[in-house]
Amino acid sequence: MNDSRQRIRVVNPNSNEAVTRGIDTALEPLRFANGPEIVCSPLAEGPFGIESQADAESVVVPLLRLIAADNSSDAFVIACFSDPGLHVCREGTPRPVFGIAECGVLAALARADRFGVIAIGQRSIARHTRYLRQMGLMSRFAGERPLEMSVAETASGEKTLDRMVEIGRELKERDGAAAVVMGCAGMARHRLALEQALGVPVIDPTQAAVTMAIGTVQLAER
């Protein structure tokens, strides 16, 4: 491998290897000859799934340690829709750090006037809504609806796509969402099929964040 090749590190802040593999597969279309190396890894100290505020808070310090100690990557992506530790990690490294929730929502706003979010569970919604309010985006937020599934189920469940289509249609037809953001990195493998079923843009937030990271490192001085 060329030592000068740029590197983007995508960190799944949970310890679920299946979720990390799903993220890695979803990022394959963004890998290209002479492009940045995209490396995906779980956080060994993280919970099996980040499904509560306590889970999100628990990974902040381990994430900071990991990112601050990595001097070989040119950019980082925190692959959890709660963007845990985003601002702390930005303080811990001079390199750019991207949160998938922030990037996913920004990508949706570039495609549609109003967006909706598919959450893994009801208790995730308050956490996500607080974040969107802090970003000042409530006027373009159509709504958020839950799958009522675990992170592990979204990554490997046999009926996950059917449930996502059901919830996506409610966001589109009842809430007026003209784009849908998948509110968990574990949903990555369902993006294209969901977009085809709904007929509106569906944003995988990790793909959105890595796309922004690629643009950033490609345009940086070398």
Image (cartoon, helix red, strand yellow):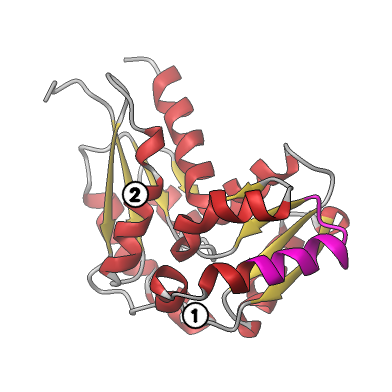
Percent coordinates x, y for residue 192 in the rendering: 55, 48
Name the quarter where the N terminus is drawn. Answer: top left
| Identity, as a three-letter code, of the amino acid under mark 1 | Glu
> Label 2 crowding class (10 Å Cα cut-off): few <14, some 14-19, many 20+?
few
Residue 203 on the magenta span = no
Height in image: 150 above or below 164? Answer: below
Residue at coordinates 43% horizontally, 76% vertically from top-left? 157
Residue at coordinates 84% horizontally, 53% vertically from top-left? 140
Residue at far top of view: 222
Q: Which residue bears the numbered disc 1?
A: 51
Report the magenta residues as a range.
165-178
Work out how far the residue at label 1 is from the one at label 2, CA to CA, in angstroms.
22 Å
Nearest the eye: 90 or 169: 169
Residue at coordinates 84% horizontally, 44% vertically from top-left? 113
Percent coordinates x, y for residue 164 in the rendering: 62, 68
Residue at coordinates 65% horizontally, 42% vertically from top-left? 107
User: Does the magenta stretch mainly form a helix, a strand or a loop?
Assistant: helix
Q: Is residue 56 visible?
A: yes
| Identity, as a three-letter code, of the amino acid under mark 2 | Thr
